[in-house]
C-alpha cells in the first residue's frame, strides 16, 4: 500500500502516527484482534456512490478506512456502491479514484457493487426459497403508507402470502424485464410490527429500466442499499464495515441478511459521526446543485469543499490527513470550525512552502539616490528554517513596487511601516526612507520618492534599528499576474440547515487581483506549485487557468486566521 506520510512532518498528528490520539473504533478493532473475533486480519473498505465528487466529509471516511488498514497491516478496498444507475456516471468514478490516490492511499482491490449483481440476485433467490422474501405489487407510496410509524405497527401486504413458486417466477420475470418501473418490488419478509422500521419488510430490489455506467443494459432490477452493502461486505471478506451514524438503525437489517444467507464471511458494522464543517456543505447532492446551476466554476472550483476543489486551491494532501486525525472519530454529531482545517493547511505549508516576494496591490517607489540603470541581485533565503531549501537571487533596482498598505501618509498608532520621513527595511535588501509623495490629478498618492542607505544591506554600520520590514519587487524585472483571493463560499455557518442554502452563498467569495507584481522567479512556477508570498499568505499556481509564462495564483490560506476576527467585528 502506498504510504501517505512521505510529505508529512513529525510535528503533525497524522492519523497513522503511532502517537495520534486513539478512538473507539481503533480500540474495538484492537480488541477484536486480541479475541480473534473477526479473524486475524483487518479488512475495511471505502464505499462511495459515484453520483458526484468526493468532499471533505469523505476525506474523513477515507482516512479512517485506509488509515486503519495501514495501521493494522490490513487491507482496504475501494468499492463503488453503484446501484442507482440514473444518478451515476463514469466521470464520477474516475474523479473518486483520483481523489483517493491524491490523498495518498492505494486500495487493495477496486470493486463495484455491480460486480456482484449476479451473486446478489442469487442471494435474493435464496431468500425467496427460504420463505424470507416475496414479490410485492404495492407502489412505493402504498408501501410507505403500510409501514406504520414509531408508535404504530405496519400493515402486512396481501402479497406477503404468495407462494415460494409464485415469488420465484415473479422475481425471474422482474429480471427478464416483463414489468415496468415501480410495478413490482422484492421485499424481505421480516416483521411488520418490529419497533425498528427498517425491519418492516424492507424493499430489497426495485425495477429500473436504466442504462448503468458499468453494466450497461444487462439489468433492469437493482438491489437496494442495505442489501447491497451488507452482502458486498461479506463477499469481499470485510471484517469491519465502518459507516456513518445514520446507518446505526440499519444495522439490524445488515445483520439479519448475514444471518439468513450462506455468506462467506461476517463483517461487523461500526458507526461514527459524519464530519460537518462550518460555512460549508457536505452533501454530494447539494454540491451537485451548486455546480449544475453555475454558482461555482465546477466541482473543482477552489472554493468548493470537494477534495478536487481543495486540491486545485493548493491544500496539500498531508494537511487533510492531519485534519482528519485531529478531529478524531466519535459518535458525537458536532460541527467543526473551518479554522481547524485551515490551521492544518497552514501548518503543512509553513513546513513545505518556499517563500517568495509578491506585491498584490502595488505602489511605485523611486529610490532617487540609486544609480539609474543599475541592477543588483539580493540573496533571498527560500525558507526561514529549512536551510536545505537554499536561496535565490532577487533583482533590485531604482524603481520598485511595495504593497500599498505598507505606506500611510499619516501613520496610525502602532503602524511601523513606511510613512513620510520614516525609515524601513526592505526584505533581503536596503533600508529606505520616504522623502516625498507624488499624487495624480485626483490627489491620490501614486508614487513614493525615497532614498536608500547603501551601507544598510544586512544591517547598518551604526547599528541603528528600524521597526518595519516590508516586501518589494523590482518594477523593471517583475512579472505581472492575476491572483485570486477566496473567502467562505457561504455566509451562513450552517448552510445545510437553511431553507434555501443557495440564498446564503457569499457573493464576495471570489476576488481577482489583476495587477499583481511578482518577483521574476515566479513567472516559471509550475502548475500546482505552492509558495508563501511573504507577509501575504500561501498561494498556489492554478492548474487549470495558468499558461506557460502566465501563471494564475490562488490564495490557499492567509498567514493568520484573520477571518474569525473580521466576522466577529461584522457581528458586533
Ligand atoms: P453524500 O450525501 O454527500 O452523497 P453519502 O454518505 O451518500 O454522502 P457516499 O458516497 O455513500 O456518500 O459515502 C461513502 C462513504 O463516505 C460512506 O461510508 C459515508 O458514510 C462516508 N461519508 C459521507 N459523508 C461523510 C461525512 N460528512 N463525514 C464522514 N463520512 C462521510
Ligand atoms: Mg449517498
Image (cartoon, rainbow, N blue to C red):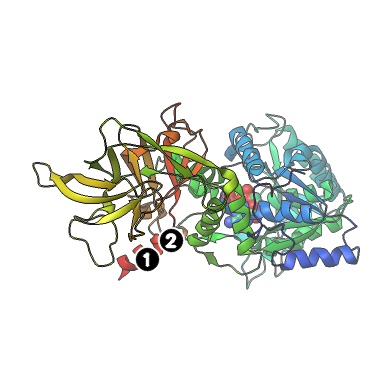
Judge whether 234 appears above or below 31 on screen.
above
* Front-most of residues 149 and 451: 451
x and y percentages locating residue 329 in the rendered image: 66, 64
Disc 2 versus disc 1: distance between alpha carbons?
Answer: 8 Å
The residue most toward the front is 461
- Which residue appears at 50% of the width and 57% of the height? 342
x and y percentages locating residue 420 in the rendered image: 19, 55
In the picture, residue 260 is in which quadrant? bottom right
Number of marks present in the image shown: 2
**Residue at image mark 2:** 561
In the picture, residue 293 is in which quadrant? top left
| Quarter of the N terminus within the rendering | top right
Judge whether 369 appears above or below 193 on screen.
above
x and y percentages locating residue 55 in the rendered image: 56, 49
Q: Secondary structure at mark 1?
A: helix
* Front-most of residues 216 and 287: 287
In the picture, residue 178 is in which quadrant? top right
**10 Å neighbourhood of mark 1: few (<14), some, or many (≥20)?**
few
- Which residue appears at 57% of the width and 48% of the height? 387
Residue 299 visible, this angle? no
Residue 164 visible, this angle? yes
The residue most toward the bottom is 151
Q: Are dots 2 and 1 in contact, CB under 8 Å?
A: yes
Please tell me the numbered disc located at residue 18.
Answer: none
**Residue at image mark 1:** 565
x and y percentages locating residue 304 in the rendered image: 47, 47
Is 228 on the left or on the right of 313, as rendered? Answer: right
Is 548 on the left or on the right of 160, as rendered? Answer: left
Is 213 on the left or on the right of 466, as rendered? Answer: right
* Front-most of residues 125 and 239: 239
Amino acid at each position: 500500500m502506498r504510504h501517505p506520510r512521505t510529505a508529512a512532518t513529525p510535528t503533525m498528528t497524522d492519523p497513522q502516527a503511532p502517537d495520534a490520539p486513539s478512538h473507539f473504533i481503533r480500540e474495538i478493532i484492537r480488541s477484536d484482534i486480541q479475541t480473534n473475533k473477526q479473524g486475524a486480519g483487518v479488512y475495511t473498505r471505502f464505499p462511495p456512490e459515484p453520483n458526484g465528487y468526493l468532499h471533505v466529509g469523505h476525506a474523513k471516511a477515507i482516512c479512517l478506512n485506509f488509515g486503519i488498514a495501514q495501521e493494522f497491516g490490513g487491507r482496504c478496498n475501494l468499492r463503488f456502491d453503484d446501484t442507482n444507475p440514473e444518478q451515476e456516471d463514469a466521470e464520477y468514478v474516475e474523479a473518486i479514484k483520483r481523489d483517493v490516490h491524491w490523498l495518498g492511499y492505494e486500495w487493495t482491490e477496486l470493486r463495484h457493487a455491480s460486480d456482484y449483481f449476479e451473486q446478489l440476485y442469487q442471494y435474493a433467490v435464496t431468500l425467496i426459497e427460504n420463505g424470507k422474501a416475496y414479490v410485492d405489487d404495492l407502489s412505493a407510496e402504498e408501501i410507505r403508507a403500510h409501514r406504520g410509524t414509531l408508535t404504530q405497527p405496519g400493515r402486512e401486504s396481501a402479497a406477503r402470502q404468495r407462494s415460494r413458486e409464485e415469488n420465484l417466477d415473479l422475481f425471474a420475470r422482474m429480471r427478464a424485464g416483463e414489468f415496468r418501473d415501480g410495478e413490482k418490488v422484492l421485499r424481505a419478509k421480516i416483521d411488520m410490527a418490529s419497533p425498528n422500521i427498517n425491519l418492516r419488510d424492507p424493499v430489497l430490489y426495485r425495477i429500473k429500466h436504466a442504462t448503468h455506467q458499468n453494466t450497461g443494459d444487462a439489468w433492469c432490477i437493482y438491489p437496494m442499499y442495505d442489501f447491497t452493502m451488507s452482502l458486498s461486505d461479506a463477499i469481499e471478506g470485510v471484517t469491519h464495515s465502518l459507516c456513518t451514524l445514520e446507518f446505526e438503525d440499519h444495522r439490524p437489517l445488515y445483520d439479519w441478511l448475514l444471518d439468513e444467507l450462506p455468506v462467506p464471511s461476517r463483517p461487523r458494522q461500526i458507526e461514527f459521526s459524519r464530519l460537518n464543517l462550518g460555512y460549508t456543505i457536505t452533501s454530494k447532492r447539494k454540491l451537485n446543485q451548486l455546480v449544475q446551476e453555475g454558482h461555482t466554476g465546477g466541482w473543482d472550483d477552489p472554493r468548493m469543499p470537494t477534495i478536487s476543489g481543495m486540491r486545485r486551491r493548493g491544500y496539500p494532501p498531508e494537511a487533510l490527513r492531519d485534519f482528519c486525525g485531529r478531529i478524531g472519530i466519535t459518535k458525537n454529531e458536532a460541527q467543526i470550525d473551518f479554522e481547524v482545517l485551515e490551521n492544518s493547511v497552514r501548518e503543512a505549508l509553513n513546513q513545505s512552502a518556499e517563500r517568495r516576494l509578491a506585491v498584490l496591490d502595488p505602489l511605485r517607489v523611486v529610490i532617487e539616490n540609486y544609480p539609474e540603470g543599475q541592477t543588483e541581485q539580493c540573496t533571498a533565503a527560500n525558507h526561514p528554517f529549512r536551510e536545505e531549501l537554499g536561496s535565490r537571487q532577487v533583482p533590485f533596482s531604482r524603481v520598485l513596487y511595495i504593497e500599498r498598505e505598507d505606506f500611510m501618509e499619516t501613520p496610525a498608532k502602532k503602524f511601523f511601516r513606511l510613512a513620510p520621513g520614516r525609515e524601513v527595511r526592505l526584505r533581503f535588501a536596503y533600508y529606505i526612507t520616504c522623502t516625498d509623495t507624488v499624487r495624480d490629478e485626483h490627489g491620490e498618492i501614486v508614487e513614493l520618492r525615497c532614498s536608500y542607505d547603501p551601507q544598510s544591506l544586512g544591517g547598518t554600520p551604526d547599528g541603528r534599528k528600524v521597526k518595519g520590514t516590508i516586501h518589494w519587487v523590482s518594477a523593471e524585472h517583475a512579472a505581472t499576474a492575476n491572483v485570486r483571493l477566496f473567502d467562505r463560499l457561504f455566509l451562513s455557518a450552517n448552510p445545510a440547515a437553511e431553507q434555501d442554502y443557495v440564498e446564503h452563498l457569499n457573493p464576495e467569495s471570489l476576488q481577482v487581483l489583476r495587477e499583481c507584481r511578482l518577483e521574476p522567479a515566479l513567472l516559471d512556477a509550475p502548475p500546482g506549485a505552492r509558495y508563501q508570498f511573504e507577509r501575504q499568505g500561501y498561494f498556489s499556481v492554478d492548474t487549470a487557468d495558468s499558461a506557460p509564462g502566465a501563471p494564475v495564483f490562488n490564495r490557499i490560506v492567509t498567514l493568520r486566521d484573520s477571518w474569525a476576527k473580521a466576522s466577529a467585528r461584522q457581528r458586533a
